[in-house]
């Protein structure tokens, strides 16, 4: 069978069909997420040993929670950006899902992440904690046993380096973001990401970098893995928190913007407010701060990276690299305590 392999998060819309191949082997392999060790339920194990049996409720039904975190190279060594906030959200996600017996607390998870980054010798990396379940198939969470695993690997810009520099292209998805009463918008629950996968895949196959998702009332919610902000007359607008994931990068950008004297307004936005904005940008841990140059075939502003977005990108990168006055409160330096 002739299969077209679509680029996922690598381009900025120009390369719709990245390559053509005849087998699954041409798809990006898991090996792009390489490391020597993975932390699995209390211990570091070699990468190959971090496997799960297929009779597993998370694999079948999607209960599970995860985080996406970045560790940056700084002058003082590798530092994880806003680790405490990410771990608090991880614990909150488990609580929202209804887990009552998570075997690890914040300090143990922080220690596990530090061990994972240090054991693999990364100076910068992406970090993925996942809580999944062991146990019988069936739909009662109380029959499952929660397990936590943490992987880390080198991961470049999720929406592509070119996208960061010149802006990404997006479409408004025909998929609706879930209603807050049919999903849990404050939790990174694994199965809920099928909604994101449906929207992202259709956008990528149509040649776009990302999809804008509207809420059940038709107002802008967020993207499949990023929050969304727009700029008009130098005022920054973003959607209220009720129906979106409370992004840690969104909070970072809002804080940096207010520090720098910008007004930031949280209010409902319609899709055409995006079309007529001076600037639009998305933000998330994987995507960082990425300008948007086109939505639904309409150029945003003059189709180039706008001055406010550029300024916020600069502030963001100085914060994650330890060069901003906020860095001290936001960076957690990864150093192994010597074993005595
Ligand atoms: N919205 C969704 C749906 C996401 O998956 C993410 C990525 N976690 C974000 C927003 C951005 O969140 P953060 O900045 O905390 O990574």
Image (cartoon, helix red, strand yellow):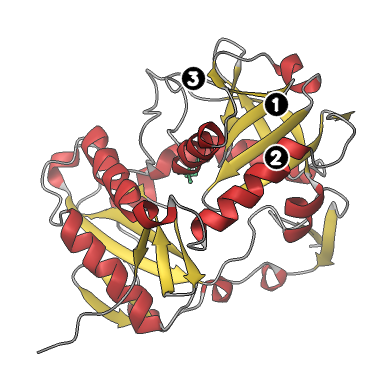
Q: Can you give x and y, in whole percent of width and height, for residue 319 in the image?
A: 51, 54
216 displayed left or right of 40 = right
Name the residue beneath numbered marker 1. Answer: 231
Name the residue beneath numbered marker 3. Answer: 240
Q: Which quadrant of the structure image shows residue 23?
A: bottom right
> SS of the residue at dot 1?
strand
In the image, residue 4 sits, relative to residue 183, either above or below, namely: below
> SS of the residue at dot 2?
helix
CA separation in Å, label 2 and label 1: 8 Å
Select label 3 or label 1 by which is in front: 1
Q: Which of 286 and 312 is in front in this view?
A: 312
Q: Can you give x and y, in whole percent of width and height, for residue 226 in the image?
A: 57, 40
Tell which circle, 2 or 3, labels the residue nearer the N-terminal end.
3
Q: Is residue 64 visible?
A: no
Tell which circle, 2 or 1, labels the residue nearer the N-terminal end.
1
Q: Which of 308 and 41 is in front in this view?
A: 308
Q: Which quadrant of the structure image shows residue 303?
A: top right
- Tag on residue 309? 2
In the image, residue 149 sits, relative to residue 167, either above or below, namely: below
Tell which circle, 3 or 1, labels the residue nearer the N-terminal end.
1
Identity of the residue drawn at 62% across and 30% down: 229
CA separation in Å, label 3 and label 1: 15 Å
Identity of the residue drawn at 54% across and 25% down: 177
209 displayed left or right of 190 = right
Identity of the residue drawn at 42% across and 33% down: 246
Q: Can you give x and y, in whole percent of width and height, for residue 168 in the image?
A: 77, 44
167 displayed left or right of 185 = right
Assign the N terminus to one quadrant of the image. bottom right
């Amino acid at each position: 069978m002739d299969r077209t392999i679509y680029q996922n998060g690598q381009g900025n819309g120009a390369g719709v069909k990245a390559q053509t191949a005849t087998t699954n082997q041409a798809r990006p392999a898991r090996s792009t997420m390489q490391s020597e060790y993975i932390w699995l339920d209390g211990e570091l194990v070699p990468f190959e040993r971090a496997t799960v049996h297929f009779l597993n409720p998370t694999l079948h039904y999607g209960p599970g929670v995860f985080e996406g975190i970045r560790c940056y190279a700084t002058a003082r060594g590798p530092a994880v950006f806003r680790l405490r906030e990410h771990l608090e959200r991880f614990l909150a996600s488990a609580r929202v899902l209804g887990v009552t017996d998570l075997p690890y607390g914040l300090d143990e998870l922080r220690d596990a992440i530090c061990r994972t980054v240090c054991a693999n010798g990364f100076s910068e990396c992406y970090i993925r904690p996942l809580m999944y379940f062991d146990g019988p198939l069936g739909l009662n969470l109380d029959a499952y046993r929660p397990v936590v695993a943490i992987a880390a690997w080198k991961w470049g810009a999720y929406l592509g380096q070119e996208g960061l520099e010149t802006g990404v292209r997006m479409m408004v998805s025909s998929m609706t973001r879930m209603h807050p009463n049919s999903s849990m918008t404050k939790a990174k629950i694994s199965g809920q990401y099928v909604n994101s996968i449906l929207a992202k895949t259709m956008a990528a196959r149509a040649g776009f970098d990302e999809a804008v998702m509207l809420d059940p009332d038709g107002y802008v919610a967020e993207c499949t893995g990023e929050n969304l902000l727009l700029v008009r007359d130098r005022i920054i607008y973003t959607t209220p928190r009720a129906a979106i994931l409370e992004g840690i990068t969104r909070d970072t950008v809002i804080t940096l913007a207010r520090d720098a004297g910008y007004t930031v307004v949280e209010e409902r936005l319609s899709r055409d407010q995006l079309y007529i904005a001076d600037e639009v940008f998305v933000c998330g841990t994987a995507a960082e701060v990425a300008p948007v140059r086109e939505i639904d075939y309409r150029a945003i502003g003059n189709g180039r990276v706008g001055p406010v977005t550029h300024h916020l990108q600069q502030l963001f990168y100085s914060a994650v690299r330890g060069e901003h006055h906020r860095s001290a409160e936001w960076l957690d330096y990864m150093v192994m305590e010597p074993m005595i």
